[in-house]
Image (cartoon, grey):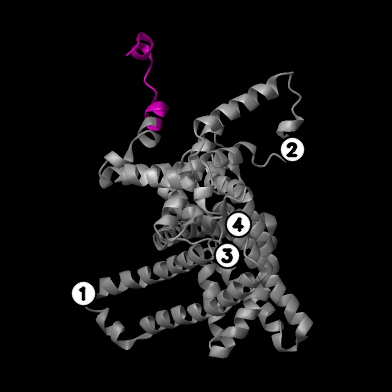
Amino acid sequence: MSAHDKMAPFSLSGSLDRFIWRADLSELPAWRSRPIIALRMAAAISRDLAKGQLTLWAMSLVYTTLLSLVPLLAISFSILKGFGVHNQIEPLLLSLLEPLGEKGVEITQRIIEFVDNVKVGVLGSLGFAMLFYTVVSLMQKIERAFNTVWHIEKERSLGQRVRDYVSVLVIGPTMIFVAVGISASISSHAMLGTLSEIEPLGTVIKLAGKLIPFLMISAAFSFMYAFIPNTKVQTRAAVSAGLIAGLMWNLLGWAFASFVVGSAKYTAIYSTFATLLFFMIWLYVAWLVLLIGANISFYIQHPAYLRGQGGRQRLSHRAREKLALTLTTLIAQHHYHQEPPWSAEALSQRLRIRNDPVADVLAVLEAASLIKATADSPATYLPARPFEMVSVTDVLAAIRHGRDGGDLSYDRIPGPDGIDDILAAFETAAATAISGQSLKDLALAADKAKG
């Protein structure tokens, strides 16, 4: 230890940084590693909230919800009417707006009046199409918000949107019908009333009465986290995030209800606008909880993103070359061993790195016709031509020269005389040093080294 290190004052932030970010979790038991992972996740979510992207999406969704809420409920009302349980919409809205207290009751009555005035059967084809378009726009914006959280650039195709959105519009009201029916059956069952008078069964029944709504909300969140992002979400990530979001929903609902109760002065200032104001604030809080939960599910599935400052990860030139050779070698190994081809996410999880640099390098290799993506969802990668005919030099050349048509390409940099000759000589020397080695040779050599 140097004299400077000995004299350095103790830093709480420095010690916390070492404890959270520099600890090697692979060497720690689960009871020590899991609290550190939770701290890392809390720090990453705080970082994302500070950047403002989640809050901007939440505000955008509040505006879209105000425009789409009545059409959404009108279509759900029509579907539930087919089950004969359309009257369950009002209890559902009351439960969702419960933190607003009496104002929630007033808002529910107004919304139900609007929904009753929307006669879906007499709208006609054009009117129903506009109604459906409004609902689809809301769902599309929710998907875009989730895709942003999940760092997904590719959206669903039009056919996939129609199929998936219609499925949600049908399955969602059905799930509501089943959930409300179960709750009503439990609360009204005569035997439960008798058993609740017997201890400790009475305490257990009361706890179950509080736990069942929490589990229902958590299940709804988990369903959204699993199916809305345009990627394959692990069940563990969706369920864990759903439980955390359900807990946040209940805690923030209790806090917001306390705020509304003590907000008499705001009612005096804003008069009749106070109800709308509180409704918009609660919508904002609800969407923010949903997006934070989506963020949690993303970090559970992709812990490599917990480090850094967010955004796309930029690699050094040498790191891109190593990643390109690594990816092509893994693809070659699975191809020659007749194993299932790799997807971009599977490759990133195999290497324990973020998936955006993996996707970038795969795109360069695909543009160079070294690999090709299948039409599967998610796409997997295969050799575009026999790997025994693709040299290691071809891969490195693709990475070095790929995407030269950008804003500032190689040819547009005015270098002094002799610079191009030096770079050409460097590339020739490097190609000569590894000439004759194909990707198949590299993959088989890696197999031998592993064996």
- Residue sitting at x 62%, y 85%: 78
Q: CA distance from mark 2 to mark 1?
A: 75 Å
Q: Is residue 397 above or below residue 227?
A: above
Q: From the top left corner, tell me how far across and down residue 328 is, in percent.
A: 49, 47
Q: Nearer the viewer, mark 3 or mark 4?
A: 3
Callout 1 amino acid = Glu
Of 450 and 90, nearer the camera is 450
Which label belongs to residue 375? 3
Instruction: Tell me the crowding category of disc 4: few under 14, some 14 to 19, or many 20 or more residues within 10 angstroms, Cα based.
Output: many
- Residue sitting at x 68%, y 75%: 71
Of 210 and 138, nearer the camera is 138
Q: Is residue 411 above or below residue 437?
A: above
Which region of the structure is painted magenta? 1-17
Callout 4 amino acid = Ala
Of 314 and 234, nearer the camera is 314
Callout 3 amino acid = Ala
Q: Nearer the viewer, mark 2 or mark 1?
A: 2
How many numbered discs, if any? 4
The disc, 3 or 2, on the residue closer to the chain's N-terminal end is: 3
- Residue under label 4: 145
In the image, is 322 to the left or to the right of 6? right
Callout 2 amino acid = Asp
Is mark 3 in CB contact (under 8 Å) with mark 4?
A: no
Which label belongs to residue 199? 1
Q: From the top left corner, tell me how far across and down residue 233 is, in percent.
A: 47, 61
The disc, 1 or 4, on the residue closer to the chain's N-terminal end is: 4
Is mark 1 in CB contact (under 8 Å) with mark 3?
A: no
